Image (cartoon, rainbow, N blue to C red):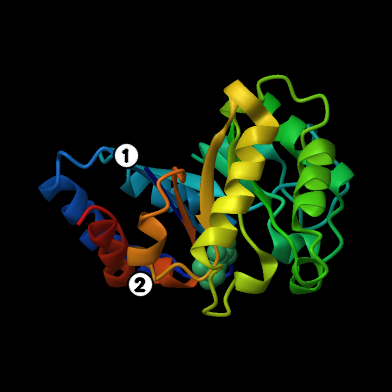
């Protein structure tokens, strides 16, 4: 199982101290076979990767510029630069960035650049509430997958995060039957070479009991709740109880 923490725009150097609880939890639960990946803001990638060196926790970034090279892109960093400070993973296609204008085509370029840089991709897809109400979920997911992963060779190495936009940060999660339908649709689309599929959107220690029963999922992408080490540990514990 994957537990990916998306810290969004949160945290400073002091905040990293809270991870000592998660490190301790992992040390005390050696049998825990899960992948735990923290994606802090870029300012914390280096200090976090140093802190996690001798642990089983890993570090990822939250986005990057699509260019492989340096350039006149004020405020941006590319995948190579993120890799050089310790990122191993990268979240791409997050709906908060799609809402700011990221297109499938741009996300595709970012995936290619990040793959070239040696980062593992966590590729987010998901429908808006309007699209869900209009029964367009499958159509939207298919389009995001087809365009976002166009001419990507090793698709099975990508980690896919199904994150309904209406569920992110709202406290709402899909009905189990709807979630199963969407995840099964994604699985069928890839066939045998299916990537790992995570669910993301308001995962917390109350709703994890419902979500963990959906056994076609490979893990969770956790935003708000991952900013508290206690809540994050509770989610992991409850997943296996
Ligand atoms: C996310 O940002 O990817 C996310 C799932 O956020 P939240 O858990 O806060 O809904």
Which corner quadrant of the image does residue 31 belong to?
top left
- The secondary structure type at the circle numbered 2 is loop
Q: Nearer the viewer, residue 151 or 138?
A: 138
Could you tell me which quadrant the C terminus lies in? bottom left
Residue furthest to the front: 177
Does the image show residue 111?
A: yes
Q: Which mark is residue 228?
A: 2
* Residue ID at (79%, 40%): 148
Q: CA distance from mark 2 to mark 1?
A: 21 Å
Q: Residue at x 79, y 60 (%)?
A: 98
Q: Residue 69: x and y, percent?
A: 80, 33
- Whether residue 13 sits left or right of residue 223 in the image: it is left
Q: Which residue is mark 1?
A: 53
Q: Nearer the viewer, residue 99 or 128?
A: 128
Estimate the x, y position of residue 210 in percent, counting from the top left: 38, 65
The quarter of the picture where residue 49 lies is top left
Q: Residues within 10 Å of mark 2 (few under 14, many from 20)?
A: some
């Amino acid at each position: 199982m994957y537990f990916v923490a998306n810290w969004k725009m949160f945290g400073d150097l002091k905040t990293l101290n809270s991870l000592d609880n998660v490190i301790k939890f992992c040390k005390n639960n050696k049998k825990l076979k899960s992948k735990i990946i923290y994606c802090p803001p870029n300012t914390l990638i280096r200090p976090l990767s140093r802190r996690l060196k001798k642990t089983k926790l890993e570090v990822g970034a939250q986005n990057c510029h699509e260019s492989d090279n340096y350039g006149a892109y004020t405020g941006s960093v590319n995948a190579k630069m993120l890799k050089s400070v310790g990122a191993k993973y990268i979240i791409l296609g997050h709906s908060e960035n799609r809402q700011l204008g990221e297109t499938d085509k741009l996300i595709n370029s970012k995936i290619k650049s990040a793959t070239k840089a040696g980062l593992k991709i966590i590729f987010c897809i998901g429908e808006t509430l309007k699209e869900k109400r209009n029964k367009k979920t499958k159509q939207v997911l298919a389009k995001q997958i087809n365009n976002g992963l166009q001419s990507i060779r090793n698709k099975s190495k990508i980690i896919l995060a199904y994150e309904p936009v209406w569920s992110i940060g709202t406290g709402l999660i899909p009905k189990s039957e709807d979630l199963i339908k969407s995840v099964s649709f994604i699985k069928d689309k890839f066939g045998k070479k299916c990537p790992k599929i995570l669910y993301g959107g308001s995962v917390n220690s109350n709703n994890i009991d419902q979500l963990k029963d959906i056994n076609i999922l490979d893990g969770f992408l956790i935003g708000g709740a991952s900013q508290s080490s206690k809540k994050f540990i509770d989610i992991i514990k409850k997943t296996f109880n």
